[in-house]
Amino acid sequence: MKYGIDYRYLKKGATKAVDNTSMARPVDVEIDEAQFALIPNVGDYVDLPGENDFRNIPCRGKVLRRLFQYKLGYCYVQILVQEIDEDWSSLWG
């Protein structure tokens, strides 16, 4: 089974998440059964820098929820990351 992992970013106070993908690159990470990738759990902290192209949307915060959609041998995973107020340096203590 192939997996496509798509991170979405929800800024504080926003009602709609920002998606940094495009038709040319519909997911942030794609893996197949021979590869390995960690998928963060709800409550985990994520820090993904932006890229040097039109997808330059950094994704830094706490995982709010995940959605797994299965279709014809493909699992599409949406991970919603919410902006947080916490000081990142205090998280690592």
Image (spheres, rainbow, N blue to C red):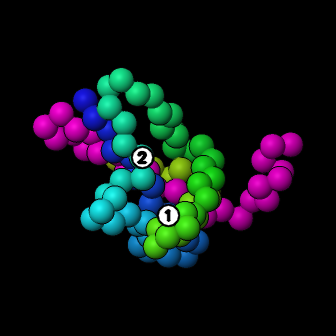
- The spot of residue 10 in percent (x, y) is 50, 66
**Which residue: 86% across, 43% down?**
93
Residue 42 seen anywhere in this rendered image of the structure: yes
Q: Can you identify the residue that label 2 sits on?
A: 29
Asked if residue 66 shows in the view, the reply is no
Image position of 40 with respect to 15: above or below: above
- Within-10-Å neighbours for mark 2: few <14, some 14–19, many 20+: few
Asked if residue 77 lies left or right of residue 61, the reply is left
- How dense is the environment of label 1, judged by Cα within 10 Å: few (below 14), some, or many (20 and up)? many
Q: Which residue is denoted by mark 1 in the rendering? A: 9
Where is residue 57 drawn, in percent x and y?
A: 53, 68
Q: Which residue is outermost to the right?
A: 93
Residue 87 is inside the magenta segment: yes
Q: Amino acid at mark 2?
A: Val
Region in magenta: 68-93
Q: Quadrant of residue 82?
A: bottom right
Which residue sits at x=44%, y=60%? 8
Q: Which mark is residue 61?
A: none
